[in-house]
Image: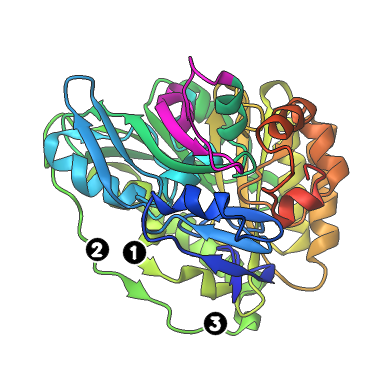
Amino acid sequence: MQLHGWGRFPRADAELIEPPSAELFPEIFKSERIKGSLIARGGGRSYGDSALSKNIISSRFLDNFLEFDETSETIRCGAGVSIDMLLRTIIPTGYFLPVLPGTGFVSVGGAIAADIHGKNHHTDGSFCDHLVRFSLLLASGEIIECSPKTAIDAFIATCGGMGLTGVILDATLKLEKVPSVCIKRESIVAANLEDCFDLIEDNESSKYSVAWIDCLAKKNALGRSILHLAEHNATGLQKYKSRRRLSIPFNIPAFLVNKHTTRLFNNSFYHLRKRTAGTNIVNYDSYFFPLDNIKNWNRVFGQKGFFQYQLVIPSDSAKRGMKEILNVVANSGKGSFISVLKKFSKSNENLLSFPEAGYTLTLDFKNEPGISPLMKKLDDIVLAHCGRLYLAKDARMSEDMFKKSYSNWEKFIEIKNRLDPNGKFASIQSDRIGLT
């Protein structure tokens, strides 16, 4: 069958294997039923080709909860459990996840494989920094237990390793006690990028911080933005948010997404938020997962899909690098509706984890003629400032760029070869960037 990531590009024909229970996973491997390369797939929310291969093994039926320990404040669940399912279970008990991505539909296995980050990396790090342990199924059919203290090499290679070391079967996660899932949000207007950077730095003690950027604004307004700071409110609900989701039932004609409609949206959004800036109380769902209320929002970009381009630039040159990036994007007229800027704290020990101390910018580009040269130009700026791109969002990074920007790639390959000596686990992405 033909599958794709959330960006809907590229598409690949694959044999999809969906074992109905965890017990069957090692049996399938030991039977040598699978011929050719293999990669695991969770919620299908990686944007590019990191979960595409000749054979794809799905974790959709690894969706059970195994243990909830309030004494240690941990929960153990199958790798196919989504962030949304986790929140549905733990919120009524007064707990929350320490790190949330931009969608609740990421699976736990996928969250580990991509070492996802959220709006609080500057204070709490990434998802795997709160990971107690996980079970990893190797290509041989053996299952090993990995944690920061046991099978350490397998742990640091699997966290952020994009599924290339084995299949994650279950995981134990640390939870966080919160007074409420109601979020006290403060929205502040930034007239330009310089102003936005200053505001983020001045408010770095805020638990959550994310800025929406108008990526088509130019000159003195370059990088104008709305910064959203947030904390858990001291009082309020401990209730899961049930969604009534709008749906985009078909592909929007691609010509409707252009520099004119994007500029109109960005200008209207900026001025609307400018008028309503201030502090208010919102449900966690609208702060962390604003796009989850629109089912199939990825169809907005048309049949050919889109690229999400997420970069990080180290602190010492972040402001200069972001200014160069935004100048190029604004002058191209190919910016997006949703562009966000966040601050990262220091990197962790995981070999292919994306975050490092600095700033990250996310941009969406419609898949259209002329977009490849633009992204290549952005690549050059990112490399010039010693930055890198996020593997979970990537669909076209070159091997040269990957190896110049991820300094631990050779150590990763060394560990992968020990865990998977016959090179069973591989994706279209890993072949493209030279990891397999």
Tell me what residue is drawn at x 55 percent, y 63 percent: 6
User: Which quarter of the rendered picture does the N terminus lie within?
Assistant: bottom right
Earlier along the polypeptide chain: callout 1 or callout 2? Answer: 2
Coordinates of residue 227 in the picture (x, y in percent): 45, 40
Q: Is residue 425 above or below residue 263?
A: above
Earlier along the polypeptide chain: callout 1 or callout 3? Answer: 3
Q: Is residue 136 magenta?
A: yes
Q: Is residue 67 above or below residue 30?
A: above
**How far, Cα to Cα, is label 1 from label 3?**
18 Å
Q: Amino acid at mark 1?
A: Asn
Coordinates of residue 329 in the picture (x, y in percent): 73, 54
Which one is in front, 168 or 289?
168
Q: Which mark is residue 127?
A: none
What range of the chain is rendered magenta? 123-152
Disc 1, disc 2: CB below 8 Å?
yes
Judged from the image, the secondary structure of the residue bearing numbered disc 1 is helix
Q: Amino acid at mark 3?
A: Ile
Which one is in front, 428 or 420?
420
Tally of numbered tags: 3
Quarter residue 312 falls in = top right
Judged from the image, the secondary structure of the residue bearing numbered disc 2 is loop
Q: Which mark is residue 243?
A: 2
Residue ranking furthest to the top: 149
Specify whether residue 155 is in view.
yes
Quarter residue 139 falls in = top right
Tell me what residue is drawn at x 75 percent, y 32 percent: 413
Q: Which mark is residue 293?
A: 1
The residue carrying mark 3 is 252
**How far, Cα to Cα, is label 3 from label 2?**
23 Å
Which one is in front, 378 or 228?
378
